[in-house]
Structure formats: structure tokens, C-alpha cells
Amino acid sequence: MRDLIKNSLNTLRKSDEYICVTNEGDQISLEEATKQNIAVTILHPQQIVKTKLEEAGLYLTDTKFVNDLNELIDELNGTAKTGKKPVSGKKLSPAEKQRIIEGWADAHEDGMNKAQYARKVGVTYQSFINWIK
């Protein structure tokens, strides 16, 4: 899968032009196809990449699929939105603030940064920063 993604990126980055493909699926230059009198299909690199990705099960033109994929990546990276709306510090008791501050040590050991932790516990980043000062 990693190779497919890298190859797809390379195809898109290298090719601003259309690509000629034979009936067998081989890429060929238009000049070479003309010399050899070979019929070709002219494709845009984006279409080639989309087709290859879909054959691998990655439907990047499906908005729902892309949203789910982005959500999965956010969950794996610890940057997912918890669905909690951040609250200001005025709505939390001193004891609640203290519990959040104490929880930061464990989250930090697990590799979470301050912004990620603040999102996870449902407080604004700035409030959290002010509490730990």
C-alpha cells in the first residue's frame, strides 16, 4: 500500500501532461506510438492514479470514505475531535482543573502534546496553558 501511495504521488508530481497507454496497459510516448502505429488511450495522470487507488480499495472520490479515512488517521494520531465543545476555565471548579492538570503528566508520557490533551479533555488550549503556569 505504501508503494502504491508513493508511486501515485510520483505520477502526479512528475506529469503535468497526458499519458498514452496501450491496450495492454503499458505507458508509451505519443511519438513512439505513432512510429509503431499503435493505438493508445490518452489519460490524465489523475485518472490513472484514481483508477489504481480504487483497484486497491481506496475510493478517494467518495467523500464519506475520505471523511472516515481522515477520522481514522486523527484517531490514530491522537488528534481526533472528542465531540466535546471546549469550555472556558470559569465553568470548571478548582478540583476539576486540578484533575485535568494531574492527567497531563500521564498523557505527556504517552506522547500527547498539550494541544492534543486539551482537545481530549474538552478545554481550550489557552485555558489549559494558563492553569499549568
Image (cartoon, grey):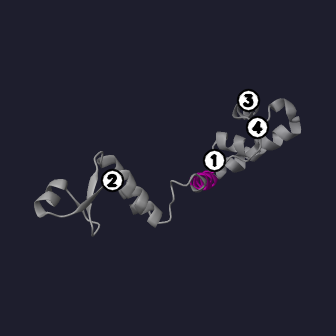
User: Which of the marked residues, 1 or 3, is nearer the chain's N terminus?
Assistant: 1
Is 115 or 32 nearer to us in this picture?
32
What label sits on residue 130 in the rendered view? 3
Residue 106 in the image: state x and y as whole percent: 71, 50
Query: Mark 4 — residue?
Result: 86
SS state under label 2: helix
Task: Tell us which disc is closer to us: 2 or 3.
Answer: 2
What label sits on residue 45 in the rendered view? none
Q: Main secondary structure of the magenta part?
A: helix
How far apart are the two marked residues, 4 and 1, measured between alpha carbons?
Answer: 14 Å
Near mark 1 (Cα within 10 A), the count class, few <14, some 14-19 or many ≥20, is some
How far apart are the two marked residues, 2 and 4, measured between alpha carbons?
Answer: 42 Å
Residue at image position (55%, 55%) is 62
Query: Mark 1 — residue?
Result: 79
Residue 21 in the image: state x and y as whole percent: 27, 61
Is 41 or 121 nearer to us in this picture?
41
Task: Tell us which disc is closer to us: 4 or 3.
Answer: 4
Residue at image position (66%, 43%) is 116
Near mark 2 (Cα within 10 A), the count class, few <14, some 14-19 or many ≥20, is some
SS state under label 1: loop
Q: Please state the extent of the stretch shown in magenta in the rendering.
A: 66-78
Kind of residue at disc 3: Asn
Q: From what the image shows, is residue 124 above or below residue 38?
A: above
What label sits on residue 11 in the rendered view? 2
How far apart are the two marked residues, 2 and 3, measured between alpha carbons?
Answer: 47 Å
- Tell me, yes or no, whether the two marked residues, 2 and 1, touch with CB atoms within 8 Å: no
